[in-house]
Amino acid sequence: MDRIKIVGGNRLEGTIPISGAKNAALPLMIASLLTADRLTLKNVPNLADVNLLARILRNHGVDLAVDGKRPGVSQHLGETFHLTARDIVDTTAPYEMVSRMRASFWVLGPLLARMGEARVSLPGGCAIGTRPVDLHLQGLKELGAQIDIDAGYVVAKAPKGLQGNRVVFPKVSVGATHNVLLAAALAKGETVIENAAREPEIGDVAECLVKMGCRIEGIGSSTLRIQGRDRLEGAVHAVLPDRIETGTFAYAVAATGGDVTLEGTRVELLETALDVLEAVGASVTPVEGGIRVTRNGAGIGPVSIETQPFPGFPTDLQAQLMALVTTAHGTSVIRETIFENRFMHVQELARLGADIKLHGDTATIKGVPRLRGAPVMATDLRASVSLVIAGLVAEGETMINRVYHLDRGFERLEEKLTRCGANIERISAG
Ligand code: UD1
């Protein structure tokens, strides 16, 4: 298994290209199931999760061709995927695949809407919390699906097609919103989703569905009004920039000190996270084609924050923020309200010398003057990258084991950081 070795202490200076968002690329790829025509997606990041979903979609009969990059095309413009689901040959998404990536459960809505049936494995437990799917099933039932659970599979049927309806989610869920939005695009009549998640990736999927011929009002708001269509057309769509990757590098620069321009990304995708960065003492400036992050001289101040659905502070940046404030002047308080068990990075950060106390959903982080390198273990995607940030700050060598978690969601991480002066290298298992 690959490991990542970091020798901390270097400031970061330079430019980092931001990739397309994983959390938009996945549902956009799934949207290809809704049409027999070709869906072309540009700026798709090259990530393990994307490749796994490509395999799952191929299983359903989706034909996928990947374009090489043209000479002169800027590096952050990722690969172009052409996806064509002319014939769906299999409406089952098997356990072996769905259990490896939760977002693959989102094929349920589109398969059901297009084929009138789908059999999708329950995703099962996950390291960061129980993560049920009740809201997904509630939404699809409200569109007329009959749903049974059989031997660990969700078996959904709608022999006469789905029927538009009013879906009111009791709790904000990104995945349930995607699932119902995708299904509603092929349902008869109008679907109104209330208390929809407002994450920019939902907006990106909705914009793509509009290009495919679906009328959607309220994009970006918590009420989505979708006019279903009998058939959708192909489209060409570019995946929006990854706000979590943006925030991760921004926090890394704040942690080490330095001056980095994050290319190809936009402030409005992560205003709350950038406001926090300014509050701790870094400076964030929108520049043409990106965002410039600097921190010089002064140290890092403490924060008090809780994670919330968008536009609140993202749970996917909680671990990175915690790494940043381990060396703050003062005590920070971070409350995790989305996932009950998303603190696995705490004990690993403690191995580097961080002083963190956990009480239920709240972590209290007393800033220490310095971290010291140590061997640590990556436990989930965002926790892993928080260890990278801590390793960049720590004195001496940090060795991160089990980095396959990082490869699920961060494209060319070592290369992007090395270009800015970090001492980081991947040690291949060979
Ligand atoms: C998505 C993101 C993930 C992010 C999360 C929250 C992708 C691929 N993943 O995950 O990176 O951390 O949003 O921003 O985009 N819940 C239920 N019942 C359900 C569904 C969810 O109770 O049917 C709960 C979850 O357990 C959790 C909360 O709702 O406590 C939010 O989860 P949700 O927004 O659905 O997260 P995901 O879509 O799985």
Image (tube, helix red, strand yellow):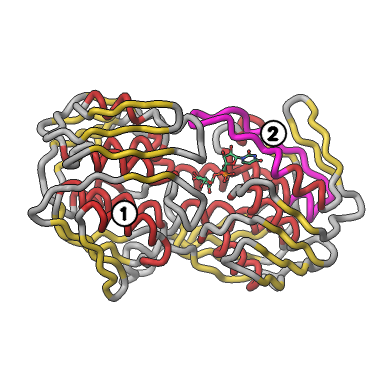
Quadrant housing the C terminus = top left
Q: Amino acid at mark 1?
A: Val
Secondary-structure class at tag 1: helix
Q: Position of residue 168 (x, y in %)?
A: 73, 53
Q: From the viewer's perspective, is 147 left or right of 267?
A: right
Q: From the viewer's perspective, is 276 left or right of 148?
A: left
Query: Can see residue 155?
Result: yes
Quadrant housing the N terminus = top left
Q: Nearer the viewer, mark 2 or mark 1?
A: 1
- Residue furthest bottom as drawn: 288
| Disc on the earlier residue, 2 or 1 | 2
Q: Quadrant of residue 215?
A: bottom right
Query: Can see residue 430?
Result: no
Q: Quadrant of residue 429?
A: top left
Report if residue 255 lies within the magenta region.
no
**Viewer-side residue, 114 vs 221:** 221
Q: Which residue is mark 1?
A: 276
The residue lying at 51 percent from left, 40 percent from top is 338
Mark 2 and mark 1: Cα distance apart in space: 39 Å
- How would you rate the neighbour count of disc 2 (Cα within 10 Å): few for under 14, some for 14-19, many for 20 or more? many
Segment tinted magenta in the rendering: 110-136
Q: Position of residue 139 (x, y in %)?
A: 75, 49
Q: Amino acid at mark 2?
A: Ser
| Disc 2 to disc 1: CB gap under 8 Å | no
- The quadrant where ligand 1 appears is top right
Q: Which residue is mark 2?
A: 121
Report if residue 113 lies within the magenta region.
yes
